[in-house]
Structure formats: C-alpha cells, structure tokens
Image (cartoon, coloured by chain):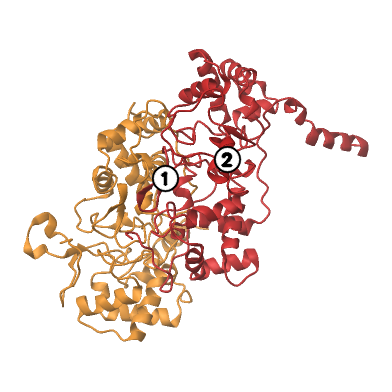
Chain colours: A red, B orange
C-alpha cells in the first residue's frame, strides 16, 4: 500500500464512524482508558472492602452493586446499622461522565464523591482517619499504595484517588443502541426505533443527551407541574438555600436504565413505564399514550451496555493491629 | 515408549505424589471437579443475589464473603434488617468437605444448608416460595434453570442444588502447606515446620485432620476445662436436647484460617494466637509458651490456599412482575 493510501485508510478508520452519529443528540459510550492499572486494581479492592465502614459490613459495592447495574435496586439506600437513606442510590456506571456527583451535585468529581459515604454517619459511618488507619495496618494494602503512589503509607487522598480511578473504568460501551449509532442499522427493532424517534421529537433529549444520555445538567423535577413526593430532598436548594434551586436535581444517566430501577431521586417510580409517563406529564406537559410509553421504554432498554467484566477481588486480611469493626455499635 | 513403560509412567504420575503425604494426618485439598458448568454458573448468580432476602439487600455472599475467606470477619453475623446473629459465620470455603453443615451439623449437606438462611427470619427473612417466585419472574433466570434442570420453572430444590453445586467449587488448593505435602520441602520455613510438628505432637490433629484440617467430627468445646462464654449456643444439644451433646460443635476447618477471623462459634477469639492458647488449655490441658503459640500460628498461616478465582457475576434484572423487596419492613 502506498503511504498516501495508508494515511487515507487510517484517517477513515479513526474518523469515519463518527459521521453516523454526529447529528444525533446521543453519542456512543467510549471504552475506558486505563492510565494506572495498579491504582485501578487497588481502587477495585477498596470499592469491595466493607472495612471502610464502621460496622465492617457495608462497602461501596453494597449500594452501588456492580452485579446489579451499579445500584442497589432499592427505593432509598441502606446505611450502616440499617439506617434508611434519604435518597435513591444513583448508578456508579458511567458516572465519570456526570458533570458533578450526587443527585444535588455537591461533589465536583468522583474523587470528591468517594470520600463522602465513608465519613457520612448515615452511610458507612466511619471517619477518614479510621478508614486510613485500617488500611495502613494491612501490609498488602500498604504495598499496593506504595506501588501506586510512591508513598510509605496511605492517606484519604490516595484512597479516594484509587476508588475514583477504578470507577472511571466502569463504563458500559457496546449497547445495542451504540451499535446502531455506529452504523449497524439492524441493531434496533422497528419499535425501538419508533421509541427513539419519539424520545427525540417529544423533547426528552433536551435533558437526556450526550454519551451518558443525561448527567450533563441540573433540571427542576416538576417543570410543568409540581412533583408530589414525601421525600424531603430539596435538590440543589439543600446546598444553596435558594428558592430557585428547589427540586433542582442532576439529570440522571439513562444508560443501563433497565438495570437501575426503581427511578427518580426518591425511587418512587417502580417501573420504566411509570417513569416515562411521569416525566412526560411533569417535564414536557405531555400525556404519552400507552403505545408511546411502550415504544420509549423499548428504546430505553437498548441502552444496556457491556457490564463490568473483572474477577471478584480478593481482599488482604486484617491482622492483630487492625482496628476492629463495630458491627453492633 | 513401550506400552508397559507407559503404564508404569502413568501409574507413577497418578499414584506417585500420594506417598509423600500418606503418613501425614493432613492431606492436600483436591481441586474442584465441576460436573455441570451451567448449574455452577447459575448457583454463583444465586449466591450473589440479594433478592433471595426479604429486604433485597442480603445475599449468601454478605455473610460468606468470597473476597474475605468466605466469611464476614464479624463476631456474629448480621441478618436482614441488621438483626444480630447468634453465631459466627463459618467459612463456605472447602465446606463441601464437612461431615455436616452449620456449627451444630443440623444440615446434612450443602444443599440442605442452602435452604436454611433464605427462610430463617433472623437471616435472609424470606420464604422458599417467595424466593422461587422472584426467580421465576425473571426470564433470564428461568432459562438458566431450564438449561440446568430441564424444567420450565424453578423450585426450591433446584435453587439449593444450584447453590450447592457452586459451593462445591469453592475449594482452595495449592496452599504452601499443600506444596510441602506434595514434596516441595522448601515451601515451609523452619518456624512453620516447627509449628506443624508441635501441632501434631501436642494432639491438635486428633480433631483437626484430613484435607480440610477439621470438619470431620463433632467435639466438645471445653474438653479439659469448661468454656466460659456469654453466647447461648449449646451446639448439638440444641437439636437433641441431650445433656451429653451440650457444647458439642463441629470442628471447624483450619484451611484459610488466617482469613476467617474472629474464631470459635462465638467469635470471641480475635486473633489466631488467642485461639491457639485457648484451644491448648481447654482441649489439651496444655499451656503453650508464647514461642510455641507463634510457631503453631506460623504453620496455620501456611494453610491459606488459592482463593476463588472467577468473574463477578452479573445478575439479570427484575421486571414489572417481580415481587418487590421490602428494605424497610
């Protein structure tokens, strides 16, 4: 092959597929780029380690269960000592694409988020100091921190860096919808395509756009009509105290939405059909017919991508110097 | 190679290594033989599925955490709704080698054991009927049951068969001690060997013998002197009502004992050193010196074998017909 032809071929290979989705409001989920394998492997262990909680029973994976769409499939989450959480657990899958973390966006990124639950009395109920003391008591962990960060002992910054590095790998490419976007027109059925068209035409993509089909803006829950809920969360107003921010929540990603039931910040919508119906009425002022709801739901189920694909991590054991868990207070 | 020489060589390959451990009270852990891959894969999913509990939060893996030696590393276990369990969670690793299951042996095998926690109000707090209804509502599960059992819908017998089939694969071969038994005399240090000699000479192997280094008999906890505990478990007497069975418990396996802290049925021994010291006094009437304790502990830590090595299972989602979990009663 001549050099000029080779260049043309390479350009076509890299830039080519983009043309098929460049006009669409949704783009394919890019595959994860792992920068530091050691840090990711360490973060994976930490994500599964219940010793980051005071009880020794709750890990990140308890509420962001990677066997179940990165969520717990409960209305609101269960914290240490079975405390009832105030809000629905958002999926950790594709969360690196969110403009901020938590429903109210109070953490600017995954690293900042990761420190929250560890020290939240209603979640993992530990403290950053205790979590770090536990990890530093375990030689195998210390070695992994040393290898990843070049330091002789861990601190909370390294802990949250490692967890965030692992979470950044939790993307779900290759959904049927992404196959469609990339040019495989047979990847979707007629019903699913009708649903996608309706999803765009009726305005859902005003908020649910981009590779994550959401996660890119804050919007008012109850734009056209007020949302009726017993849940006390006030969204961004809980941070700013401003009335204008009342019920402003981060638009959730719709990637893998078939797996992340129940829906909304209060987990009150048990089914996708209910969620679509309520969104139509409250956000778009539109009463979808049953057929329309079914079509949109059919489309939404094509957003389920490749789920986490790794071996169950084996955690290094505690020893005589490790602070003991307090499972019963 | 002549046929006769080939036969000799083959016999040597299969029977040969046995000679090096045939005189020992402990034998190597055999590798798992998987009979039905589909059933094992199904059982693995069920083992990790919190929908077998009433709350939707507790799975088999919650208390028999395969990232942590098949145990929860807590004094006693946490049941649904954070109920305090009555007894220390025994490891599921190598449990297929136990003569019976549970500390009091009330289940004759893994299949019978698997049904227990699901319907125990203090553990997973569900019922066999509800668990089966949940699974039968999920097409992907139904398909796997169909493929494994040839039936159109699951029943509790199939559920416990599948979980048991998975658990039978949870053996941990190739510990350093097994390498030593198989002829690698450099696999153990001098201290570890001294510990093993003392472990045999002082009579520990009267109860802790066989491939699992235990699991083969019931013995009285407090043989020489009474065991002082606030824990109310009475062992086999809880089943038979016989005074002679009071404090008779199944001898636990010592395989992976470094990972399965804390120790004893009440979880009162936090360290291996404490466990060895107490056992010496109560079972053998012998006060080990600190050096002797350290040597025995060093030997015990060589019993950690190859931990579970498989991908995190991805669970099929619930749907609109699936009975809903009750996380808050």
Q: Nearer the viewer, residue B69 or A194?
A: A194
Q: Name the foreground residue: A33 vs A122.
A: A122
Q: Is residue B203 visible?
A: no
Quadrant containing the C terminus of chain B is top left
Q: Indicate the quadrant where residue A173 lies.
A: top right
Residue A39 is situated, as x and y percent measured from the top left of the image, at 61, 58
Which label belongs to residue A307? none
Q: Are marks 1 and 2 on the same chain?
A: yes
Residue A233 placement (x, y as % from top left): 48, 40
A32 relative to A120 in the view: left or right: right
Horizontally, residue B185 falls left or right of residue B215, namely right
Q: Considering depth in this image, is B299 or B114 the residue closer to the camera?
A: B114
Q: Nearer the viewer, mark 1 or mark 2?
A: 2
Residue sitting at x 45%, y 33%: A262
Give the number of marks: 2
Compared with A322, A272 (above or below) is above
Quick one: label 1, few (<14), some, or many (20+) residues within 10 Å? some
Can residue A29 be seen in this snapshot? Answer: yes
Subunit ID for the residue under disc 1: A
- Element on which disc 2 rests: loop
Label 1 sits on residue: A85
Mark 1 → mark 2, Cα distance in angstroms: 24 Å
Q: Residue at x 27, y 57 (%)?
A: B98
Which chain does the numbered disc 2 sit on?
Answer: A
Viewer-proximal residue among A247 and B185: A247
Q: Position of residue A42 (x, y in %)?
A: 56, 59
**Which residue lies under the disc numbered 2?**
A242
Where is residue A206? Give x, y as percent.
65, 26
Along the polypeptide, which appears first: circle 1 or circle 2? 1
Which of the 4 image quarters holds residue B22?
bottom left
Which residue is at a point 25% across and 84% down the rendered structure image?
A: B287
- Tell me if mark 2 has few (under 14), some (14-19) or many (20+) residues whose alpha carbon lies within 10 angstroms of its own: few
């Amino acid at each position: 092959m001549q050099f000029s032809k080779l260049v043309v071929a390479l350009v076509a290979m890299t830039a080519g597929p983009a043309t098929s989705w460049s006009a669409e409001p949704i783009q394919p989920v890019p595959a994860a780029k792992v920068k530091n394998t050691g840090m990711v492997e360490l973060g994976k262990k930490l994500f599964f380690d219940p010793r980051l909680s005071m009880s020794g029973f709750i890990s990140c994976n308890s509420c962001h269960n990677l066997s179940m769409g990165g969520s717990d499939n409960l209305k609101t989450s269960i914290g240490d000592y079975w405390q009832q959480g105030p809000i629905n657990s958002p999926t950790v899958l594709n969360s690196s694409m969110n403009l901020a973390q938590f429903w109210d966006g109070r953490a600017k990124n995954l690293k900042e988020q990761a420190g929250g639950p560890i020290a939240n009395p209603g979640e993992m109920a530990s403290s950053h100091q205790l979590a770090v003391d536990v990890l530093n008591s375990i030689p195998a962990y210390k070695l992994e921190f040393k290898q990843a960060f070049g330091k002789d002992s861990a601190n909370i910054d390294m802990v949250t860096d490692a967890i965030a590095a692992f979470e950044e790998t939790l993307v779900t490419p290759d959904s049927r919808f992404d196959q469609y976007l990339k040019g495989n027109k047979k990847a979707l059925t007629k019903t699913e395509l009708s649903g996608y068209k309706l999803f765009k035409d009726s305005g859902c993509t005003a908020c649910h756009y981009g590779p994550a089909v959401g996660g890119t803006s804050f919007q008012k829950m109850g734009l056209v009509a007020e949302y009726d809920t017993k849940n006390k969360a006030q969204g961004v107003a809980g941070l700013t105290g401003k009335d204008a921010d009342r019920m402003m929540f981060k638009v959730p990603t719709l990637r893998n939405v078939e797996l992340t039931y129940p829906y909304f910040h209060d987990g009150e919508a048990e089914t996708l059909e209910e969620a679509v119906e309520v969104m139509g009425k409250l956000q778009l002022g539109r009463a979808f017919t049953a057929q329309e709801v079914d079509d949109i739901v059919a489309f939404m189920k094509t957003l389920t991508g490749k789920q986490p694909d790794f071996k169950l991590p084996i955690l290094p054991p505690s020893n005589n110097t490790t602070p003991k868990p307090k499972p019963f207070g």
